Image: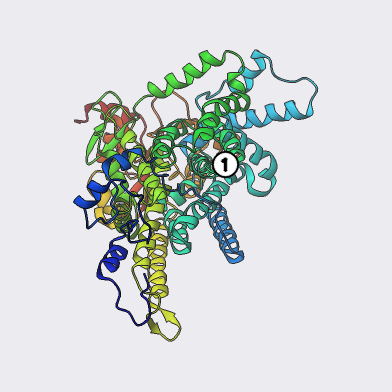
C-alpha cells in the first residue's frame, strides 16, 4: 500500500494492508446512502470491513486448490542417453555372467510348458489348422496351468529366436535380463518428474545392484518379468490420471500383468486407495480400465481360460490359496511341510539381512522424508503404500514364506525408489551456491558421494557373491558364513548344481552308476541328460541301494537320510562357496541303507 509523497501514511491503513483486511466503504472514499444502517454504523465507528457471519454464510464456497497431476517427464537428451546406458549395462552384465549357473528348480519346471506355448503360437500364426479346440488347448496349455501365459510366451519365443546364439538354457533366460533393463527404465521415468535426476539415478542403482535382484535376472523364471509388468502398471496408472488414452494403455498392461503372476492381483490395493486420496476426481478412467478392460485382455491372452473360463480361473486361484508351504530352514528351525508354519516376521527379517546396508540406511531416511511431506508429495506416499502393502501381505499368517525374497520380490523397486527419495531430500537441503572446489558445488559433491556409496556397496555385494547372488546376505548377519552359522537357508533353488558339479559327475561317475538326488529337483537331471549335459547311462530314478548320493545343502528339505549323510558320512567331494557347503557327493551303497534309519534326529 503506497502513501502520498510527502505525507505520512495512515497507521490504520498500514495495519489493514499488513493483515489483509478489506477496507470499509468510508476508507474507499465511498458514502453510504442516507439512513442506511445508521445505527450499526454509529455502534461501530472503527469499522474495518470485516464480514459478518451472515455474509460469510451467504458466500459460495471457495474453489478447491488445483490438484497436482503427474506430468510427462521433461527429460533431456542426456537423460535418455543415461537411461539407455543403464538399460544396456544391465542387460550386458546379466547375459555376460550367465555361464556356469546351474539349472534352477523352477526353470526345469517351466521349460516344457514354455516350449509348448511357443509351438502353439506358431501353429496359430502360420498353420491353417488353428489349435483352439479344448483338446488342443489342454495339450499345449495343460502343463503347469498355475503359471500364466506371459512368462511361457516370453521364454518360449526367446528360445525359438535365440537358441542358436545363447543355447538351450541361455535363450530361455534372455527375457529376464531384458525385464531387468526395462525395470530400470521405468524406475527412472517414475522418479524423475517428482524428485529429479539424482533421485532417479540413485533409485536405478539401488535396485539394479541389489545382489538378489541381479541374481534373479539370470534365470528363466517369472520373478524379473513380474517386477517389470508391476512397474509398468504403476507408470501407466500415473499417466492415466491426465489422459484417457493412457487409461486405455493401463487396462491393456494390467491385463497382461494378471497373466504374469498372482502378485499383480494386489496392484489395485496399492493404486486405488492412493488415487482416491490424492486424485479423487481424476482416476475414474483408470478404475474402469482396470476393472473391465484388464480382465478382457487377461482372457484373450491366456488360452487356457478359453474353455471353461470361470472354472479354470477358480482353479487357478484355488491353487495359490492352497499351495503347499514349501519347507524352510530359518534360524536353525525347520518350518512348513507339516510342521509349524514360518513366523510372520520372515519377510521383514529376510529383507533386512539381504538388502545392501547403504540402501537400507537410505530407505529409513526416505521413509521419514515421505512421512514428513505426506500431504505434498503424492508419489512418495504411493511408494510407501506399495512397499508397505506388499510386506504386510507377505507377513500374513497363512501367506507362503520360503525361498528368500522370491515370493515378494516386487517390493524391492519400491524400496529402491524410497532410497532415491532420501537422496533427493539430502541433496535438496544442501546449498547449491556453496563451492567446495572451484566449480564443484556442495550439492554436486554430495550427490556424487551418495551415488558412489550406493554403487560401490551394491557392486561389492554382487562381486563377492557371484555366482551365488541368490545366497547373498549382508553384514548385519555376518554375510553368507554368518547366515549359515545362524541357521539360515543359504541355498534353495538348485542353481548351485552348476557346471563344476556336472563336470565332476561326468569325470568320476562309472557307467551305469545309480545316483540318488536329495533336496533338489530330479527334473533338473532329466533335462541335463536330455540336452546331453550328463551321460544317458547314469541311472537317476531307481530303487535303492544307490551307488552315490548327491545332496543339495538345503536344510529345510533335510529329513533323516539327509541329516545322516550331512553329519555322519564323509563326502567324496564337497562344493563350497565362501566356506559354506552347497553341494556334496557321497559314495554310499548298501551300507548307507542300513545306517540312515538309525540316525537320531
Query: Whole-percent x and y of residue 454?
Result: 39, 63
Kindly identify the residue that appears in the image at 67 percent across and 43 percent down. 163
Q: Quick one: which residue is furthest to the right in this view?
A: 128
For this view, does 169 lie left or right of residue 583? right
Kindly identify the residue that appears in the image at 33 percent across and 35 percent down. 394
The colour scheme used to paint the residues is rainbow
- Residue 341 sits in quarter: top left
For this view, does 287 lie left or right of residue 330? right
- Residue 30 sits in quarter: bottom left
Residue in the foreground of this view, choosing between 427 and 166: 427
Q: What secondary structure is marked by label 1?
A: loop
Residue in the foreground of this view, choosing between 277 and 515: 277
Where, quadrant-wise, is the N terminus in this rendering? Answer: bottom left
**Crowdedness of circle 1 by 10 Å Cα count: few (<14), some, many (20+)?**
some
Q: Quick one: which residue is furthest to the bottom in this view?
A: 438
For this view, does 118 lie left or right of residue 408? right
Is the residue 595 above or below the residue 550 in the image?
above
Asked if residue 569 shows in the view, the reply is no
Residue bearing mark 1: 533
Query: Whole-percent x and y of residue 156?
Result: 63, 35
Kindly identify the residue that appears in the image at 35 percent across and 57 percent down. 359
How many numbered dots are placed on residues in this image?
Answer: 1
Query: Whole-percent x and y of residue 159?
Result: 65, 40
Where, quadrant-wise, is the C terminus in this rendering? Answer: top left
Asked if residue 545 shows in the view, the reply is yes
Query: Whole-percent x and y of residue 549?
Result: 39, 35
Residue in the foreground of this view, choosing between 496 and 61: 61
Residue in the foreground of this view, choosing between 533 and 542: 533
Is the residue 572 above or below the residue 327 in the image?
below
Is the residue 243 above or below the residue 335 in the image?
below
Amino acid at each position: 500500500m503506497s502513501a502520498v509523497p510527502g505525507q505520512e501514511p495512515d497507521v490504520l491503513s498500514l495495519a489493514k494492508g499488513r493483515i489483509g483486511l478489506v477496507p470499509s466503504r468510508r476508507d474507499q472514499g465511498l458514502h453510504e446512502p442516507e439512513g442506511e444502517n445508521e445505527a450499526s454504523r454509529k455502534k461501530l465507528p472503527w469499522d474495518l470491513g470485516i464480514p459478518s457471519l451472515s455474509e460469510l454464510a451467504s458466500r459460495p464456497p471457495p474453489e478447491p486448490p488445483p490438484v497436482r497431476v503427474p506430468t510427462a517427464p521433461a527429460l533431456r537428451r542426456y537423460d535418455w542417453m543415461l537411461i539407455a546406458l543403464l538399460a544396456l549395462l544391465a542387460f550386458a552384465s546379466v547375459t555376460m555372467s550367465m555361464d556356469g549357473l546351474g539349472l534352477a528348480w523352477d526353470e526345469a519346471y517351466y521349460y516344457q510348458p514354455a516350449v509348448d506355448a511357443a509351438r502353439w503360437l506358431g501353429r496359430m500364426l502360420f498353420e491353417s489348422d488353428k489349435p483352439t479346440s479344448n483338446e488342443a488347448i489342454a495339450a499345449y496349455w495343460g502343463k503347469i496351468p498355475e503359471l500364466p501365459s506371459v512368462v511361457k510366451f516370453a521364454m518360449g519365443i526367446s528360445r525359438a529366436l535365440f537358441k542358436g546364439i545363447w543355447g538351450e538354457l541361455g535363450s530361455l533366460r534372455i527375457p529376464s535380463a531384458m525385464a531387468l533393463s526395462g525395470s530400470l527404465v521405468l524406475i527412472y521415468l517414475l522418479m524423475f518428474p517428482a524428485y529429479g535426476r539424482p533421485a532417479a539415478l540413485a533409485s536405478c542403482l539401488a535396485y539394479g545392484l541389489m545382489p538378489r535382484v541381479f541374481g534373479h535376472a539370470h534365470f528363466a523364471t517369472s520373478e524379473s518379468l513380474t517386477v517389470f509388468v508391476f512397474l509398468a502398471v504403476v507408470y501407466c496408472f500415473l499417466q492415466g490420471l491426465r489422459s484417457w488414452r493412457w487409461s486405455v494403455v493401463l487396462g491393456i498392461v494390467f491385463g497382461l500383468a494378471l497373466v504374469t503372476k498372482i502378485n499383480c492381483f494386489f496392484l489395485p490395493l496399492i493404486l486405488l486407495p492412493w488415487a482416491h486420496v490424492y486424485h479423487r476426481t481424476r482416476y475414474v478412467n483408470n478404475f474402469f480400465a482396470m476393472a473391465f478392460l484388464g480382465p478382457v485382455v487377461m482372457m484373450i491372452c491366456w488360452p487356457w481360460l478359453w474353455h471353461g473360463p470361470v472354472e479354470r480361473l477358480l482353479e487357478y486361484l484355488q491353487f495359490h490359496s492352497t499351495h503347499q508351504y514349501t519347507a524352510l530352514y530359518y534360524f536353525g528351525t525347520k518350518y512348513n511341510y507339516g510342521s509349524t508354519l514360518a513366523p510372520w516376521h520372515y519377510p521383514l527379517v529376510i529383507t533386512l539381512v539381504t538388502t545392501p546396508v547403504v540402501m537400507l540406511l537410505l530407505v529409513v531416511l526416505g521413509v521419514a522424508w515421505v512421512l514428513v511431506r505426506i500431504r505434498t508429495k503424492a508419489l512418495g506416499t504411493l511408494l510407501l503404500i506399495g512397499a508397505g502393502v506388499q510386506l504386510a501381505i507377505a507377513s500374513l499368517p497363512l501367506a507362503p514364506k520360503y525361498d528368500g525374497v522370491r515370493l515378494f520380490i516386487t517390493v524391492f523397486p519400491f524400496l529402491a525408489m524410497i532410497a532415491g527419495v532420501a537422496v533427493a531430500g539430502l541433496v535438496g537441503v544442501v546449498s547449491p551456491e556453496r563451492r567446495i572446489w572451484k566449480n564443484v558445488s556442495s550439492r554436486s559433491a554430495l550427490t556424487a558421494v551418495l551415488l558412489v556409496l550406493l554403487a560401490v556397496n551394491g557392486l561389492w555385494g554382487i562381486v563377492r557373491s557371484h555366482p551365488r547372488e541368490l545366497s547373498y546376505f549382508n553384514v548385519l548377519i555376518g554375510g553368507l558364513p554368518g547366515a549359515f552359522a545362524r541357521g539360515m537357508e543359504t541355498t534353495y533353488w538348485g542353481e548351485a548344481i552348476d557346471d563344476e558339479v556336472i563336470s565332476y559327475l561326468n569325470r568320476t561317475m562309472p557307467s551305469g552308476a545309480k545316483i540318488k538326488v536329495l533336496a533338489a529337483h530330479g527334473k533338473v537331471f532329466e533335462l541335463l541328460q536330455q540336452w546331453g549335459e550328463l551321460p544317458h547311462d547314469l541311472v537317476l530314478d531307481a530303487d535303492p541301494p544307490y551307488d552315490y548320493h548327491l545332496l543339495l545343502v538345503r536344510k529345510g528339505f533335510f529329513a533323516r537320510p539327509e541329516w545322516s549323510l550331512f553329519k555322519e558320512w564323509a563326502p567324496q567331494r564337497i562344493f563350497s562357496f565362501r566356506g559354506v557347503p552347497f553341494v556334496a557327493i557321497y559314495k554310499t551303497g548298501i551300507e548307507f541303507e542300513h545306517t540312515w534309519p538309525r540316525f537320531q534326529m
